[in-house]
Amino acid sequence: VSQYDPVEVATVYIAMFAARLDDHAFWRPTPDGEAEGHWERARRPLTPEAALGGLRGDKPVSSYMEDAVGATHVGAVDFDTEDGYARGLEVAGVMARAGAYPMLERSRRGCHLWVVIDDQVPGQAMRLALRWWTGQANAHWARDPKVEILPKRLEQRGPDTVGSPLRMPMMPHPVAGRRWPLLRADGTRLGESVSATLLAVDQTPAGLVREAAERAPLPPDECRIPAWARPVAREPGDCVQVLEAAGVARAVPGRGCRCPLHDDRVASLSIARDGERVWCKSPSCVAYNNGRGLGADQLARALGELAAAPA
Ligand SMILES: [Zn+2]
């Protein structure tokens, strides 16, 4: 931050890596030390002073990846696995070969991959493009819950919704306390200082993101409800049988189980007592179906489409 005015450097830094300028998040340690802490929404603008506090000191901040209307010029993939840096390098390689300029930052575990583009796109386009490139490197990574793609999908959008934050590049890790430099796709360092790094950042053409997003299949949890699922099918059928055939464990009539139609970590799927219908509690899931749920035939069809969908 030497030969330039620090506030100007921080202003450029914010413009580059934050999509939402009227808010940000700060690290709130847990007092009892049971868990380490969490990113808390600040509910105030992301100022150059706040950014400098993180870049120079030990008060890291996270930025939100979409503005209030859902547009963005920045995206990231958080590889939170032991081999995360190797994964990041592979995805960055795919992106670089497509003409993009991904940047990598190691983290305590794994790494963050950042991309800054030269125009705004809908957050969904950024997310789909990053998922497409991740899937091109390895189909399983695009579906791995430990590989988080940002911006995330928002159920609703408005002035009061912000989505998920990500620690801004070159900020110290709030728990590990150390920081890592931004790297090019080949693993070399962009610059020795923050200002040198900012000068070395190449913006990815937004057209590449739009193209990749168009090629990406919409993940099942982002699909609109297909026409065939809308009418309430009353034909009797055995949903338990269908679920068991799909490999769902502990499918019991009148009970809940893990929903196989979205990335479910709790038992979101309810099975009717007669076993002829299922409902998912997640409103974005095809098995929610506006509260109507699915009959056995519809469930089988939804599972078939999910299995046939490319990663
Ligand atoms: Zn579901």
Image (cartoon, rainbow, N blue to C red):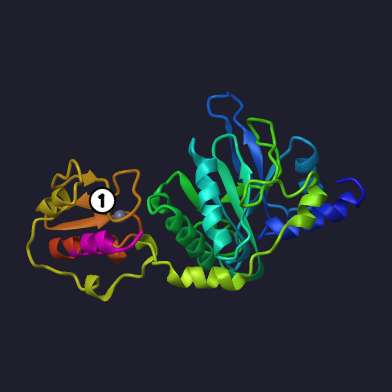
Asked whether 85 or 16 is in front, the reply is 85
Name the residue tied to disc 1.
269
Instruction: Tell me which residue sits at (44%, 70%) in the image.
Output: 215
Q: x, y (%) of residue 167?
A: 64, 45
Percent x, y of residue 109:
55, 35
Asked if disc 1 is less than 8 Å from ligand 1, the answer is yes
Near mark 1 (Cα within 10 A), the count class, few <14, some 14-19 or many ≥20, is: many
- 4 relative position to 307: left or right: right
In x, y percent, where is residue 86? 52, 42
Q: Which of 231 and 88 is in front in this view?
A: 88
Residue 308 within the segment the image draws in magenta: yes
Taking the image as four quarters, which one is ligand 1 found in? Answer: bottom left
Q: Name the residue at the bottom extreme.
A: 227
Q: Identify the residue at horizontal 19%, vertical 42% (top origin).
A: 249
Q: Where does the magenta region start and end?
A: 301-311
Image position, residue 144 (x, y; %): 40, 47
